Amino acid sequence: MALVSIVVMLKWLSISAVIVAIDLYTKHLVQRAFSYGVHLTITSFFDLVRYHNEGAAFSFLASAGGWQKLFFSGVSIVAIGVITYLLRKHSHQKLFCFGLALVLGGAIGNLYDRVTLGYVVDFLYFHYQSLYWPAFNVADSAICGGVALLLLDSVRKSA
């Protein structure tokens, strides 16, 4: 791998590292400040909370009996490997790699929680009147933003 490719690859990995650092730091702050289930109303549509998600997005399979933690950890590890490979192979495709870097950072942040805590800490909680969006965290936001960039990149390439 040429020196230029290594430098470009490090750029993408450093974006992922920043996402991981912000994600873990914000989760740490929430764990120190809140007991499980506590809500702090910030606005009429946003609360800070502390929830534990043992499943995947939107608490999918959260009450599946425990096997899902190992399954989602395995999926995350495979995804991290595939994303790292794609970053290396396509390191000069800026939008594609920026999206991958965001997804990678989010995957690592949530994997860390799953491995060390047995669940993922969620704390951002949006709602409108009696409609509630499931709580999420910085890692989830990075994954969603990264996937949106990957879709945008795909649409731009096909147009």
Image (tube, rainbow, N blue to C red):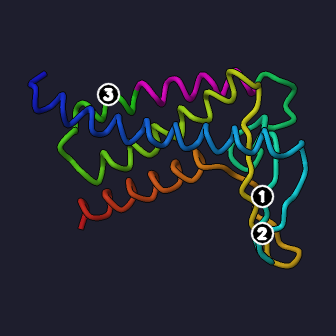
Where in the figure is residue 102, as x and y percent of width and height? 44, 46
Q: Mark 3 and mark 1: span between their CA atoms?
A: 36 Å
In this picture, residue 47 sits left or right of residue 144: right
Give x and y (percent) for residue 16. 42, 39
Looking at the image, do the residues carrying marks 1 and 2 touch, with CB atoms under 8 Å apart?
A: yes
Residue type beneath disc 3: Tyr
Q: Decide which of tag 1 and tag 2 comes sooner along the chain.
A: 2
Q: Residue at x 21, y 47 (%)?
A: 93
Q: Where, quadrant-wise, is the C terminus in this rendering?
A: bottom left
In front: mark 3 or mark 1?
1
Helix, strand, or loop for circle 3? helix
Read off the residue under disc 2.
Answer: 42
Q: Determine the CA span between mark 3 and mark 2.
A: 41 Å
Residue shown at 70%/21% (left/top)? 116
Q: Which residue is mark 1?
A: 48
Q: Residue at x 35, y 34 (%)?
A: 13
Q: Which residues are magenta?
A: 68-81
Q: In screen coordinates, is 92 left or right of 68?
A: left
- Give the alpha-carbon distance from disc 1 to disc 2, as whole Å: 7 Å
Residue nearest the observer in this picture, 90 or 25 = 25
Q: Amino acid at mark 2?
A: Ile
The three-letter amino acid code for the residue at tag 1 is Leu
